Image: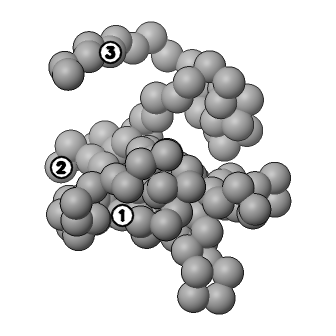
Amino acid sequence: MRRLWLAAWGDEGHASFQLLLERSLTHVGAYDGARLVGFVNVAWDGGVHAFILDTCVDEAFRRQGIALRLVERAADVARVRGAQWLHVDFEPHLEGFYRQCGFRPTGAGLMRLG
């Protein structure tokens, strides 16, 4: 996980990914053999709202539909586990990708805390 995180986000990420993964509604990985090449995390509010976080694919494996399949699988699992709404925040250049995944625009707010 650390290798993919560093490649995707430019830092080493969490000291331990275990806590992050334990608190998720689900998380989905894509593998090339034993190597993790894609990841998406689904956080949730304990009720009907789930949240896509940290979608990433190793640069060498991009443009093959892996991220789309990761998000589709994450949505399927979230639905089965009781989520009725799936949210995602993204940077403007990712709008086309998330529209392709089935997301529609909504009004939202964001507050920087640190």
In the picture, which quadrant includes the N terminus? bottom left
* Labelled disc at residue 112: none
Most extreme residue toward the bottom is 33
User: Which label sits on residue 46?
Assistant: 2
Amino acid carrying label 2: it is: Gly
Q: Is residue 33 left or right of residue 55?
A: right
Mark 1 and mark 2: Cα distance apart in space = 12 Å
At 68% from the left edge and 24% from the top edge, which residue is drawn? 93
Where residue 15 appears, as percent x and y from the top left, is 22, 60
Observer-side mark, 3 or 2, equals 3
Label 3 neighbourhood size at 10 Å, few (<14), some (14-19), many (20+)? few
Compare marks 3 and 2 and give the one earlier in the sequence. 2
Q: What number is the disc on residue 110?
A: 3
| In the depicted structure, whether residue 110 falls above or below residue 18 | above
Which type of secondary structure does the marked residue at label 2 adopt? loop
Q: In percent of the image, x 57 and y 19: which residue is there?
A: 105
Residue placed under numbered mark 1 in the picture: 26
Q: Distance between the residues labelled 1 and 3?
A: 24 Å
Quick one: SS at disc 3?
loop
Given residues 67 and 75, the one toward you in this image is 67
